[in-house]
């Protein structure tokens, strides 16, 4: 008797369900994608017990006939593709024909649908179909799922608690709403409305409903494109960040995806403005020719393969960095709202009767301020001009010879500040028209020193100084054979290492602008990168090394400064091209606005 045999349909569906139906959130993702493919404009999702009790997805889409309803639950049955060419250029969310039969094989399903002409109902109990029957309902489709994994208890041990599963589902629904703002989504948990979007085709409106007003007011809309890719979306400014990457939402041709390389490019673009252990809030849509992207990687359809990804990474980094450089603004301190203070009833009634909206959905965002200061050039007076020799030849008037130069206009990104005092040897307190400025003295000097070193680095023709005794760097046997690559990395710093023996490198001279006590540390830092075989962009390495130099040459915490030193530091910070963050991404200062102080003092 043959040992090899063909598995029956129900068993193959259960096997497929192991990948397609990982948890309730995966079921909802598949069902909502089907609703979007059916051109629905309203989609409602209801769950109980984190989706393990019940799931119901209803839409007002095109619906199906009775025959199509039965066929939809057969494996590899789909209306999305029909030939190989379609698979190479997928324009729909679904295409594999595995989701519905896989879900039906491990749960109890009731499906009702109306295609505009007739309505039908189908019940499937863990793969066993009942006869399709006529059923009254409006146009669209509703699929109810109950008793998930009841007959496959081994899968239940991988399901976490109800709150965790609910949070995944809500996150999925919010991502759908963000990528499809023209569709009205409603999500009910235990019959309570948990999230809603209104289908106004307004991405900012959806973003506001997900993240709230405080973050929405500190966002920028971005867009950019090259020959193969177009990117667009919403990015929060660096002061709003998260402890993980989950707030970086990526879509390709409106399909939500996980694409680590693009995530890393976004994080790298923010790195100069954010600490290394924090991550930005970004929603990015990528548009590309479907033939350049392969979504047929995994049944869950979260993963993709992409051609020409280097061009995409470069576009993401350059676009986001340019937006951040252009739109950075000071970080503000916000206070928690205090309890309501009793007011007169008639005043309260006036507020209630006021029909004017006091808090619009989106406040007018402050534009980055550019402060211009005029520096006048002193022109010598007539009395200061040398006497003109007496000559019979008529001389032109002195006033016509001396050209009055135009006053030089210097632009700053921080308004003029008056230094008040130092707080605890750590912070500089200053005042401006906007309010109180609290300046981190170490971070501020890091930024000043960073731009100083950066400008020195751009000037390649700098004097060098020789060590009286060459600097020996020992214990580098593993990378001696990479000396050529190492010197290429150091070339922009005018530094060249020589080999000495089997495990020692020699440094004989450095630029005069690098302090002797800082050289060895940053050289070893770069050598550590090579020893760890880290592949890092030259620009990133240069930033990292300059940031290290700036850190070690800056004033420390708990180090008291004189008034002149503080005034000099504040003025140097104002002159920086990017004064809002230190090279490691921490804010250099925060502000407390006058209106916030007035509010807190109940003025």
Image (tube, rainbow, N blue to C red):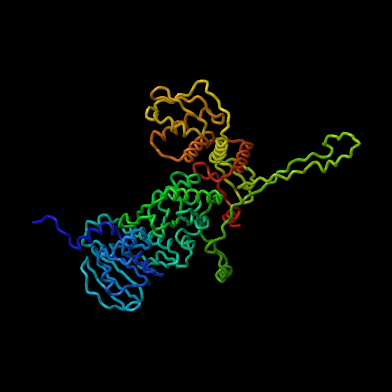
Across and down, in percent, residue 250 comes to 42, 55
Q: In this picture, is 389 found above or below 185?
A: above
**Quadrant of the image for the N terminus?**
bottom left
Residue most toward the right?
392
When the figure is inspected, residue 407 is found, relative to residue 174, above or below; the finding is above
Relative to 532, is 424 on the left or the right?
right
Between 581 and 541, the one lying in front of the other is 541
Snapshot quadrant of residue 120? bottom left
At horizontal 23% and vertical 69% (from top left) the residue drawn is 124
Which image quarter is the C terminus in?
bottom right
Residue at the limit of the structure toward the top, as seen here:
469
Q: Nearer the viewer, residue 491 or 29?
A: 491
Q: Is residue 76 visible?
A: yes
Position of residue 351 measured from the top left corner of the image (x, y, whole percent) = 57, 68
The image quarter containing residue 148 is: bottom left
Expressed as whole percent of the image width and height from the top left, the position of residue 129 reads 22, 70
Closer to the camera in the image, 461 or 439? 461
**Residue 179, percent from left and from top:** 43, 61
Give the number of callouts: 0
Is 340 situated left or right of 256 in this image? right
Can residue 425 be seen at all in this image of the molecule?
A: no
């Amino acid at each position: 008797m043959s040992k090899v045999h063909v598995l029956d349909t129900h068993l193959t569906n259960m096997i497929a369900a192991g990948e397609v139906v990982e948890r309730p959130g995966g079921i909802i993702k598949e069902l909502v994608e089907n609703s979007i493919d059916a051109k629905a404009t309203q989609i409602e999702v209801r769950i109980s017990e984190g989706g393990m009790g019940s799931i119901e997805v209803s839409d007002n889409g095109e619906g199906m006939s009775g025959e199509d309803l039965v066929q939809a639950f057969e494996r590899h049955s789909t209306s999305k593709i029909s030939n190989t060419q379609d698979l190479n250029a997928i324009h729909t969310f679904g295409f594999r024909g595995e989701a519905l039969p896989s879900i039906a094989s491990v749960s109890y399903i009731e499906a009702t649908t109306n295609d505009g002409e007739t309505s039908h109902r189908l019940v499937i109990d863990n793969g066993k179909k009942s006869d399709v029957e006529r059923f009254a309902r409006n146009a669209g489709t509703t699929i109810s799922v109950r008793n998930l994994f009841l007959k496959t208890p081994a899968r239940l041990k991988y399901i976490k608690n109800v709150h965790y599963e609910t949070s995944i589902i809500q996150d999925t629904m919010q991502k759908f709403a963000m990528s499809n703002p023209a569709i009205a989504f409603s999500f009910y948990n235990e019959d309570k409305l948990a999230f809603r979007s209104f289908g106004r085709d307004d991405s900012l409106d959806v973003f506001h409903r997900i993240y709230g007003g405080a973050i929405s007011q500190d966002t920028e809309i971005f867009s950019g494109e090259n020959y193969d890719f177009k990117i667009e979306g919403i990015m929060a400014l660096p002061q709003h960040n998260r402890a993980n990457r989950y707030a970086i939402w990526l879509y390709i041709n409106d399909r939500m995806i996980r694409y680590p390389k693009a995530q890393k490019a976004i994080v790298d673009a923010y790195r100069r403005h954010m600490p290394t252990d924090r991550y930005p809030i970004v929603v990015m849509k990528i548009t590309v020719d479907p033939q350049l992207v392969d979504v047929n990687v995994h049944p869950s359809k979260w993963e993709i393969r992409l051609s020409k990804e280097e061009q995409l990474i470069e576009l993401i980094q350059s676009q986001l960095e340019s937006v951040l450089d252009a739109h950075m603004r000071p970080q503000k301190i916000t206070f928690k709202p205090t309890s309501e203070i009793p007011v007169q009833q008639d005043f309260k009634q006036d507020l209630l009767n006021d029909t004017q909206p006091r808090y619009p959905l989106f406040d007018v965002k402050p534009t980055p301020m550019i402060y211009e200061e005029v520096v006048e050039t002193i022109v010598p007076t007539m009395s200061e001009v040398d006497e003109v020799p007496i000559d019979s030849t008529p001389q032109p008037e002195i006033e016509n010879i001396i050209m009055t130069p135009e006053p030089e206009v210097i632009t700053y990104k921080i308004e003029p500040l008056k230094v008040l005092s130092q707080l605890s040897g750590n912070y500089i307190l200053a005042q401006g028209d906007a309010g109180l400025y609290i300046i981190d003295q170490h971070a501020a000097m890091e930024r000043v020193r960073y731009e100083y070193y950066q400008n020195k680095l751009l000037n390649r023709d700098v004097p060098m100084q020789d060590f009286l005794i060459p600097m020996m760097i020992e214990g580098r046997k593993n990378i001696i054979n990479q000396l050529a690559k190492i010197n290429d990395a150091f070339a922009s710093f005018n530094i060249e290492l020589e080999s000495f023996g089997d495990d020692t490198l020699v440094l004989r001279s450095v630029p005069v602008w690098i302090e002797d006590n800082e050289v060895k540390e940053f050289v070893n830092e770069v050598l550590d990168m090579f020893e760890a075989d880290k592949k890092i962009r030259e620009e990133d390495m240069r930033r990292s090394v300059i940031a290290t130099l700036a850190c070690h040459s800056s004033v420390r915490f708990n180090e008291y400064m004189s008034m002149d030193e503080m005034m000099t530091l504040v003025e140097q910070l104002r002159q920086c091209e990017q004064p809002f963050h230190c090279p490691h991404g921490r804010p250099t200062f925060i502000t407390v606005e006058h209106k916030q102080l007035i509010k807190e003092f109940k003025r």
